[in-house]
Image (cartoon, grey):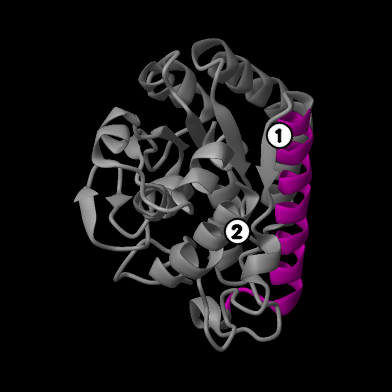
Amino acid sequence: MVLTAVLLAALPPAPAAARAQSAPIEYVALGDSYSSGAGAGAYTDLLCQRSENAHPRLLAEELGADLTFAACGGATTGHVLNGQAGALDADTDLVTIGIGGNDIGWFNAIAACIVPLADCAPQIEEAERKATEELPEKLDDVYEEIADRAPAAEVYVTGYPRLFAARNTCDALGQISVAEQRRMNDAADLLSSVIEAAAEDHRFTYVDTRGAFDDHGICAGTPWLHGLTIRDLPYHPNAPGHRDGYFPTLLDAL
């Protein structure tokens, strides 16, 4: 198991013959753009926006694990079921997965809030409806598939951070008001609660990233997420967000 492997790694080095017989951790990273590292730069796969700076890469390096990096930008629960889950098998030791945002049309809601003089409340409310009425069953299907395919694996489900510092209107040329930022943060909290409940129902470990990103949202002094930008993926964690937000939070949960 992963926790055992981490503890053993802290012990004095074993003889060479013993080390040679110790198999590395088999780690599979599933999920969407928040897991693939979209927004973090140094991409090895532009189609899926897999980044060398993504937290699965950092975790695999820390653990000395063999990583199968299946997470892909734009993925939904259906993509995990019909493609990414094929990377799992009985030898898988560790799984991380972050999924759900695309299933509820979360970025459609964000885009609506950027439009000048538009009311994005209906889009936020629709995303919340999908989160509460549709997403739980979809997550159940994904988590059951993971458990069936990788019965010996420890599974860690990563949540989503709140996007905004919600203190000023620095983003999108001031088009996203503080009230809209707070409203979207409330929706992010709802999404997190749905994902956490589904993970706990399957006895998976939920990794809540919101606390790590406190004081580092968009419009904060040192943001760990991109706002509206043409230089990288907007409304996604940047490299510090993965390195200082997701990675240590996930490592602490192991």
Q: Residue furthest front?
A: 15
Residue at x 42%, y 15% (from the top left corner): 89
Question: What's the amino acid at mark 1?
Answer: Lys
Is 225 part of what is drawn in magenta? no
User: Which structural element holds mark 2?
Assistant: helix
The total number of labels drawn is 2
Task: Give the residue pinned by disc 1.
Answer: 130
Residue at x 47%, y 28% (from the top left corner): 93
Image quarter (top left, top right, bottom left or bottom right) of the N terminus: top right
| x then y, percent, for residue 244 | 50, 69
Residue at x 65%, y 79% (from the top left corner): 215
Question: What's the amino acid at mark 2?
Answer: Thr
185 on left or right of 254:
right
Q: Are marks 1 and 2 in contact (CB under 8 Å)?
A: no
Q: Is residue 141 above or below residue 133?
A: above
Magenta part of the protein: which range?
A: 175-200
Q: What label does residue 249 carry, if any?
A: 2
Is 194 part of what is drawn in magenta? yes
141 on left or right of 149:
right
Real-space CA distance between mark 1 and mark 2, rounded to the nearest whole angstrom: 27 Å
Going from N to C along the chain, the mark reached first, 1 or 2, is: 1
Magenta stretch, main secondary structure, is helix
Query: Is residue 131 shown to the viewer in this render?
Result: yes
| x then y, percent, for residue 224 | 50, 72
